[in-house]
Amino acid sequence: MASFYDANSRATSMTLEQEDDSTSSSAHYEAQASRATIEPEQVHDDLLKDSDDNITSKRLIVSIDFGTTYSAVSYVPLSENQRVDHISSTDIQSIENYPGDKNPAESRMKKEVPTEVMYPLDSQFRNRANLNRPSNTRTNVSGSDDEHTRNEADAMEIDNMGYNIPMLISNSADFKWGYNMHNAWARPATHFRQANKAMGRFKLLLDQSPATQILRKSLQSTLKHLVSKKIVESEVGVIADFLTCLLRHAKSQLQSRRLYEDYQVEMVLCVPAIWTQKACRDMQAALLIAMRTADFKGVDPSGEAIENLFIVSEPEAAAAFILDTNPNIQAGQTFVLLDAGGGTVDANTYTVSQTQPLRLSNEVVEPGGGLCGSSYLNEAFRTLLHERLKTQKQNLEKGRDTLDGIVERIMINDFEYTTKRRFDIYDKHKMHESYYCANLEDDWENGIWDSSIEVQHDQMEAIFTPCLAKIAAIMEGQIDSARSKGIHVNQVILVGGFAESRSLQKYLTRHLRALSGMNNTESRVEAVASGAVLRALNKNDGPARLMRSSYGIRRDEPLGSHKEHGSAKPFRDPVDGLKYIRTIDWILKRETDLTDLPRSMWKCAPFLCVHTFKEEATQFLCQEYLYVSDSATQSHYSINSPRNRNAEEVGRIVVDFTFLREQGLIEAKRETLANGKEVGKKHYRVAYTMVIKVTGRDLRCYAIYDGKTVQRARINIASAFKPGVD
């Protein structure tokens, strides 16, 4: 079958080391069009083959559920030529044994780890924590503006993680993550001085929904301080630091089971259904940085891409797991998926379009959700403790102990790991909860006696009920909206960390009975991470391969060669003396439908890249810059044009042609205009052919010279499709 070619024209690409000269006088393109005509080489398909195109060996599918308050990693090993249709949810395992984990042995929460970090306010901590970025790592990819660099060391902090976020100190200057961060936070001395900074809920920095705006402002305040102290570079850097630690632990656990060294790794990334392409792209970038820093298998040798990356939406992943374990839901039935995490509760309603493999229709009704996750129970409980203990501050604050620290110790050690998960608002036989605290004076009015804080059942119920009521309202809103469209909801599926709560399970079940006579609820904690593995095992019949982003290459085009140049300011190349406009040529455009093409069939027409080098240059390094945009589609406009406002660099391909000089295969010359006049300085000119094609969920670039492929590059574009695209 003939390949599909994009017929866009190509212009000249220029050299490294060039200097702008925007003050030079103008010249017409016709006067510059004097270069000898050079056509791109004809490129045979054999030159575009990759060594990994047909590799079959043992595979390891690893999925990451990066949650707002808790995260999880699941995996399944596959032997060579193993049939994936024989894999079920019982074959999928989840990483456990997280450092500092204090969950009971029977708790499903052992399969999750808090999405929280604590930074020492010392830029040298990366050496101690082995968190130094690999070379050529770009972490400021999220487009954070200059306000991040302002010094706001004295800014007042606002709670942004379900724990107070003042400046804090730990017993050591080490970076902490997950349960170890919990353990440090539970030590009252942690809150005594200002040497560390904690962050949680930082996933919300990638969220753009109005519901999270207030929380994001608080998170941005913390982030700005860390950036000003040169602790992190951006929100992508914070996420990458957490994922680095997560992957290091996962790697050690996999190695202990001999499920790592001899396997090819496929990474699966779970993302919220409401995320923008940019949010998915930033998350993809953070994962790449983390894999490189953790030395986790699956990174392309160039370090610019993940070898095999699949992105799936969290609701679809959760549904895949639940429906694999629940044979009662059949094609044509509709269910509400409630993902109750620590920060947000998200609701989606789907109809099952087919079960072999599982595929869902688009959302039946508008997705719902709210900020009513389990961390808001922490906030309410903390408020209660502060109110009870404020009159005893003088008794409690001794040495490095602070009231804030004592409250956090009780909240984490006693409430987070016990009360919050086992408290049953309907169990009236449990009269009260008791929390020990030394140095307390009896205060019957505030429920304090025998060095204990007594919280009556109705008081604890008052902490839980507001969150439960909001979640029930979200659920009922989905069911009512579906009913208004004549759609009957057959089941409600509850997933996420909050799904372990007895109170939430019973509260929703009772509301379902009252609402519609339903009594069908399922709940699983690890559903998203494990379901993502199931979804990755069979990618057939997924969403259409419709591009949601444009990809292009930076080009320096002779001034006036395209009408789109308009009044854009040119620069004069200091080597050849000619004027150019720096532009972006959008090669693969958003809205391009690749569905009906084989997965490696789309490719652009071969185009020419030309670079000039000074006569005294000792290296001929030709570098092409690749860009992405979620809005731009029109080529030849200046890179600074409003049409390219949101364009971001996503990768580079560097080709070393130094051998041309070393072997005497190139000669330095001056540029000759059409009128015979020589301009510029004596220089070398290197021209080669480039082809860009789509292979699966990657964009692959090939530099061709003299009938040979001299360089390759790979850019992940999984984030440019709807989650679930093969």
Image (spheres, grey):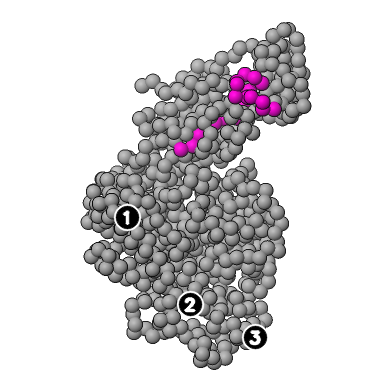
Spatial separation of the CA atoms under disc 3 and disc 2: 23 Å
Q: From the viewer's perspective, is residue 249 above or below residue 613?
A: below
Q: Amino acid at mark 2?
A: Asp
x%, y% of residue 527? Answer: 36, 57
Q: From the viewer's perspective, is residue 322 above or below residue 391?
A: above
**In the rendered structure, are the residues bearing label 1 and label 2 in contact, judged by CB atoms less than 8 Å apart?**
no
Q: Does residue 671 appear in the picture of this structure? A: yes
x%, y% of residue 162? Answer: 52, 67
| Residue at horizontal 72 percent and vertical 17 percent from the top | 27
Spatial separation of the CA atoms under disc 1 and disc 3: 54 Å
Residue receiving disc 2? 414
Q: Amino acid at mark 1?
A: Ser
Marking on residue 394: 3
Residue receiving disc 1? 481
Q: Secondary structure at mark 2?
A: helix
| Residue at horizontal 60 percent and vertical 37 percent from the top | 645
For disc 2, the neighbor class at 10 Å (few under 14, some 14 to 19, many from 20) is: some
Q: From the viewer's perspective, is residue 100 above or below residue 432?
A: above
Q: Secondary structure at mark 3?
A: helix
